[in-house]
Amino acid sequence: MKVLFLDIDGVLRIDFESHIDLIDQSLILNLQHVIKETGIKIVLSSDWRRKATWLKLATDQLGFFGIKIFDTTPIHFSCKLRWQEIQEWLDEHEDIEKFAVLDDDTGAMIPDQAETFFFTDYDLGGLNLNVVEQLIQYFND
């Protein structure tokens, strides 16, 4: 199984001034393209998984475009970093052939596995076409 650990803010949501929790539709379409080209499963690693209302918003908004959230990473309110939560999820799933982390925070990068980390910058459009092509190439190699 191929898995993409997905953040939302800074990746699929780049309009922070409106204070509306809407994911950008064009960026969802970019994610949809990656899924169609690679067959990846989505594991939500975003802070949006921490509150039931946010998780429902993400599930509904992605679901409208036919994108299913396969799972979420464990939630720790202690000092665990996002990469540690991702690593914990990976440790519990032995059937992973390839994974990537898509985030705008380098704190999600697993140490010594930089090749699995794909950085997005909301100033550069979040999940832009350049990152889309990088992900497709990575998962299909």
Image: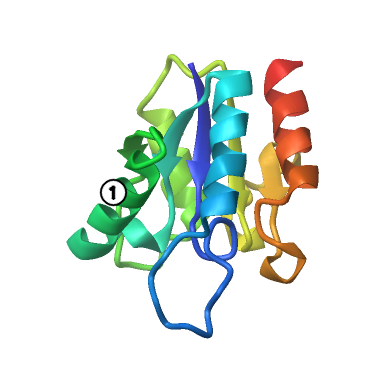
Mark 1, residue position: 60
> What residue sits 66% from the left and 59% below the top?
126
Q: Nearer the viewer, residue 41 or 36?
A: 36
Position above or below: 97 against 125: above
**Residue 76: % across, % down:** 31, 59
For the point 66% across and 51% down, which residue is it? Answer: 127
Local crowd size for mark 1, using a 10 Å CA cut-off: few (<14), some (14–19), many (≥20): some
Residue 7 or residue 116, whichever sits in front: 7
- For residue 18, side relative to residue 37 (left or right): left
Position of the C terminus, as image quadrant, is: top right
Q: Is residue 88 visible?
A: no
Total labels drawn: 1
Q: Would residue 83 be visible to someone looking at this image?
A: yes
Q: Secondary structure at mark 1?
A: helix
Identity of the residue furthest to the left in this view: 52
Above or below — where is 108 with respect to 88? Answer: below
Q: Position of residue 72 (x, y in %)?
A: 33, 43
Q: Residue 139 falls in which quadrant of the image?
A: top right
Tell me if 49 is positioned left or right of 18 in this view: left
Q: Amino acid at mark 1?
A: Asp
Q: How is the image coloured?
A: rainbow
Residue 114: percent from left, percent from top: 74, 43
Q: Residue at x 46, y 60 (%)?
A: 23
Q: Percent x, y for residue 56? A: 23, 54
Between 42 and 112, the residue placed more toward the observer is 42
> Is residue 4 toward the left or the right of residue 92 in the image?
right
Q: Residue sitting at 71 percent across and 27 percent down?
A: 136
Q: Is residue 107 above or below residue 27?
A: below
